[in-house]
Image (cartoon, rainbow, N blue to C red):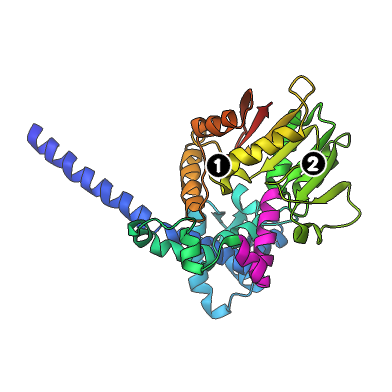
Amino acid sequence: MAQDQVQHGAAQALLDGQLELWHHIFGYVKSMALKSAVDLRIADAIHDSGGAATLPQIVARTAAHPSKAPCLRRLMRVLSVTGVFSAVAGGDGDGELVYGLTPASRLLVGSSSLAPFLTLMLDGVFVFPFFGLGAWLQRSPAPDRSLFEVTHGRALWEMGDGDPAFGELLHEGLVADTSFIMDVVVKECGHVFQGVSSLVDVAGGLGTAAQTIAKAFPHVKCSVLDLRHVVANAPAGTAVDYIAGDMFESIPSANAVFLKWILHDWGDAECVKLLKNCKKAIPSKEEGGKVIILDMVVGTGLSNPHHKEMQVLFDLFMMFMNGIERDEQQWKKIILEAGYSGYKIIPIAGIPRSIIEVYP
């Protein structure tokens, strides 16, 4: 009996192992199903139907060809099982399911939609290079030649500058993510801006983050530092000042410096140099000077089991572009090496990112 139980347990472990492998193997199908939903604007179709829609109603409100309705039904089954949409039996007795929005798909509609970010992240420009990850890892080191550069022949930002269509996709995707995360930051972590009289958003692009801060905290004089060709396209009539410059040369003086998803693009040496420039731009800790970093701290804020997986997945994504998501010890190393006296990590509830307050 005992031997039979051991054998049964071993067999079940193999079956569980196969299921785990299959879950990984077909994980890309989930991503592509989600991309298809965004391409077809299924969430918008459901939203425009009052928040609930049958398959025929979705077909009528999207670009899906009526002949593909049976295939669309199978797509909706995947999206429902994986939590993107809900599905309940209709009350007409015809067996037709009624699809609704979930917290995930609600983020794909309206002015704060994350659909542009999803479209960017699942674009072939990002997806295709990962087919070569194994081969890239076997090659001898090539200085500053990331998997992205090996595949496309140029870095991400160079590609954005040289390809107008991709540049627009990149801009819209990053703006969507910034708008979402900054709304969360000012509501959940607004205390980090209390007592700040002036703030410079370094490499802040066209000012999405700075404008959110300025609107939420009118007492903070906000400015954006970015390269000349970026600032040349800055919007007019906002409460934000735009300054052309290079963050590795100098940073305008301010009470606080804001770095949102900047340091994860750079190696330790560049980060230390940038942080030293930030330190020169702010007053002492006693006078309220600080650097506010919005980035991931791998291993922090893991109340949700998905957080750690998301953090390490995003770190691998950053690796393929020559970036890195750091854990606390790695953050501590560059912060102290740049001459700061200390720091405080503030996990942001519900998302795998944190605020790091850094004190001179």
Q: What mark, if any, has residue 220 been given in the picture? A: none
Q: How many C-alpha atoms fall within 10 Å of the one at disc 1: few (<14), some, or many (≥20)?
A: few
Query: Quick check: 222 left or right of 182?
Result: right
Total number of numbered labels? 2
- Give the residue at mark 2: 252
Name the outermost residue toward the top: 286
Task: Please provide the residue range marked out in magenta.
Answer: 157-178
Name the outermost residue toward the right: 237
Q: Is mark 2 on a helix, strand or loop?
A: loop
Q: Where is residue 341 in the image (x, y as percent from the top left)?
A: 63, 22
Q: Which of 95 and 40 is in front in this view?
A: 40
**Quadrant of the drawing holding the C terminus:** top right
**Quadrant of the drawing holding the N terminus:** top left
- Mark sitting earlier along the chain (1/2): 2
Q: Where is residue 246 in the image (x, y as percent from the top left)?
A: 72, 50
Q: Nearer the viewer, residue 3 or 356?
A: 356
